[in-house]
Amino acid sequence: MKPIEPVTLATARDLIDYRGRSEAAAAFADKQLEGAVAIHNILAAKGFAYLADEVGMGKTYIALGVAAMMRHFDPSLQILY
């Protein structure tokens, strides 16, 4: 596995769109994207990260976004869910 490089919010925005089709999804989109970038960059720096938040805040979407970014930059990466 090659080293994980940190990403910027702008790069993540080009790769992931959390806005969906509803106003409710759009309301959380920016925070979810910021969370995905933060978790990705923590993984790049430390090799592990925790994701915890209130019920309904989109933890699953954030985790999937992190996995998608990691696979984008290293297609050979294997992820266990």
Image: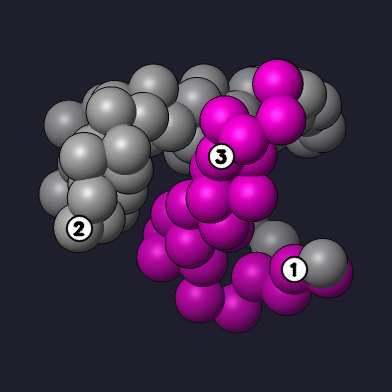
Say which of 60 and 70 sits in front. 60
Give the mark nearest the N terminus, 1 or 3. Answer: 3
- Badge nearest the viewer, 1 or 3: 3
Q: Residue furthest bottom?
A: 76
Inspect the magenta stretch and tell me whether residue 17 lies in it.
Answer: no
Give the mark nearest the N terminus, 1 or 2. Answer: 2
Q: Which residue is mark 1?
A: 79
Q: Which residue is mark 3?
A: 58
Name the residue type under label 3.
Gly
Name the residue type under label 1.
Ile
The residue carrying pointer 2 sits among few (fewer than 14), some (14 to 19) or many (20 or more) residues within 10 Å by Cα, namely: few
Could you tell me residue 31's position as x and y percent? 39, 22
In the depicted structure, whether residue 68 falls above or below residue 78: above
Could you tell me residue 71's position as x and y percent? 51, 66
Disc number for residue 21: 2
- Badge nearest the viewer, 1 or 2: 2
- Badge nearest the viewer, 2 or 3: 2
- The magenta-colored residue range is 54-80
Figure quadrant of residue 47: top right
User: Mark 2: which secondary structure?
Assistant: loop
Figure quadrant of residue 33: top left
